Image (cartoon, rainbow, N blue to C red):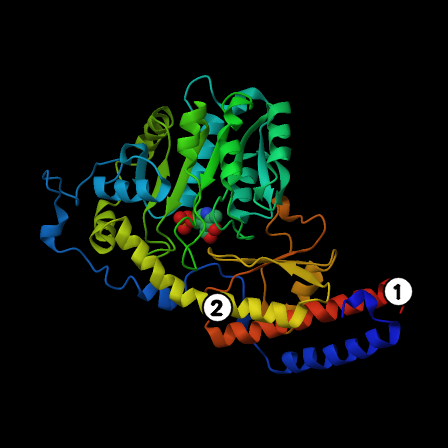
Amino acid sequence: MPLNDYNRDQLITEARKLTETFRRFQDANLKLDLTRGKPSTAQLDLANGMGPLLLEQCFLEDGTDLRNYGGLDGIPEARKLGAAMLGLHANEVIAADNASLTLMYLYVLWAYHFGPLGAGTAWRDEGDVKFIAIVPGYDRHFSVCEEVGIEMVTTPFAEDGPDIDVIEELVSKDSSIKGMWCVPKYSNPTGHVYSSEVVDRIAALGRMAGPNFRVIWDNAYGVHDLRDNPPVLANIMERCRHYGTEDFVVQIASTSKITVAGGGISFLGGSKPNLDTFRKRLSIMTIGPNKLNQQRHVNFLKNFGGLQAHMRRHAEILRPKFAMVQQHLEKGLGGKGLATWSDPQGGYFVAVDVRPELAAEIIRMAGEAGVKLTPAGATFPYHCDPEDRNIRIAPSFPPVEELDLAMQVFVNCVELASVQYRLKEIGG
Ligand SMILES: Cc1ncc(COP(=O)(O)O)c(C=O)c1O
């Protein structure tokens, strides 16, 4: 029965029962964690076959000695892998070191100070600089903007991706908006996959935006499908070529959640002018990436087909965990009007929207019962969720038994906080 149909006495009885359960969890001295959006040990073990290189594997056919300096763009086979992940040609991709976050940070920092296309294009020379932040979103994207001094304007999601009507209006009216963060497939944390229409309209944004606008297309979860017959993301660069807007999109990916997080390959893809400008700056910062690591990856994954087969093994490990989260949410909260939540077909997160003004309280209570949740507001710029509703759940890391227990605690906290709030609302 929906919570709002309970009368005062029923609410008091319910609060009593839920409090008893909550106390039992407290007494159990649990130490559980649902904050970590990282691969589990079993997932990392899938890449154990990626051993060190033998000496004869340290040379490319053209004689390149991978142990030495150079090769700023990365080795050709690694670029090919990144190109397949991003739907680009290999010469449109730079294969870099271990973190795509570094590439995004550098891209934004350099565009701000030196310009996305070099002299005369620096964002900072145009006065105020703003970015569109689709919310809820990835906290580290927002931290990059905060760090560089870029103001964020939030935009909500619609069913099939970000609310593109709102974005078109903002971008066409405000030329100080210089960019937008997108996680187009299995968005962090909601799991949205942008529809073909949304991708098409994002590709066209360059025609209505002010000068030097850039979409940062962070396809971090592009190959992280949980189920067979996954949704297909339209190729944004194809749509950009159609509109003549190739320079307005920069594409990003990495193998962090494919092989080893912290020790993989990152990719930055885009038009020739974008890559040339980025490369020029990169060459000041480094003489070249870790080509030995790139070669280890290529030897292990072989090609895009090999990478996809590897991802199916990840999915086998992750599927039961995501299913368990859904079971608990459905069984504990379904039909009660206490929360809505995403049921993503891939990626790393489940987003739960509780009743307004309750997210922080639920997170606090869960902490008291021994379950750590991502801090309230983390999925919004400046850590401010205006409605205090969104909670990000990361099921990948804990073992299934721990996840089971942690979700019981979570559901209990959502119910208890909601009942207590409702009692206050009706003056009980
Ligand atoms: C959307 C998104 N982009 C980037 C990253 C980080 O990627 P990397 O390990 O390649 O820096 C994450 C990690 O959680 C993410 O969720």
The residue at 53%/53% (across/down) is: 191
What is the x, y in percent for residue 147? Answer: 54, 39
What is the x, y in percent for residue 297? Answer: 25, 52
Q: Residues within 10 Å of mark 2 (few under 14, many from 20)?
A: many
The residue at 16%/55% (across/down) is: 53
Note whether 407 is above or below 269 in the view shown: below
Q: Can see residue 395?
A: yes
- Residue of label 2: 321
- Residue of label 1: 426
What is the x, y in percent for residue 343? Answer: 55, 59
Q: Give the amino acid type for the residue marked by disc 1 in the picture.
A: Ile
Q: How many marks?
A: 2
Q: Give the amino acid type for the residue marked by disc 2 in the picture.
A: Lys
Query: Does residue 274 appear to the left or right of 189 in the view shown?
Result: left
Q: Residue furthest right?
A: 427
**Is label 2 in a helix, a strand or a loop?**
helix
Residue 149: image quadrant is top right
Split into 4 quadrants, where in the image is the C terminus?
Answer: bottom right
The residue at 58%/40% (across/down) is: 133
Q: Residue furthest top?
A: 120
**Is label 1 in a helix, a strand or a loop?**
loop
Residue 251: image quadrant is top left
Q: Can see residue 114?
A: no
Query: Does residue 61 appear to the left or right of 146 in the view shown?
Result: left
Q: Nearer the viewer, residue 335 or 256?
A: 335
Q: Nearer the viewer, residue 11 or 116?
A: 11
Instruction: Say whether disc 1 or disc 2 marks the residue closer to the N-terminus.
Output: 2
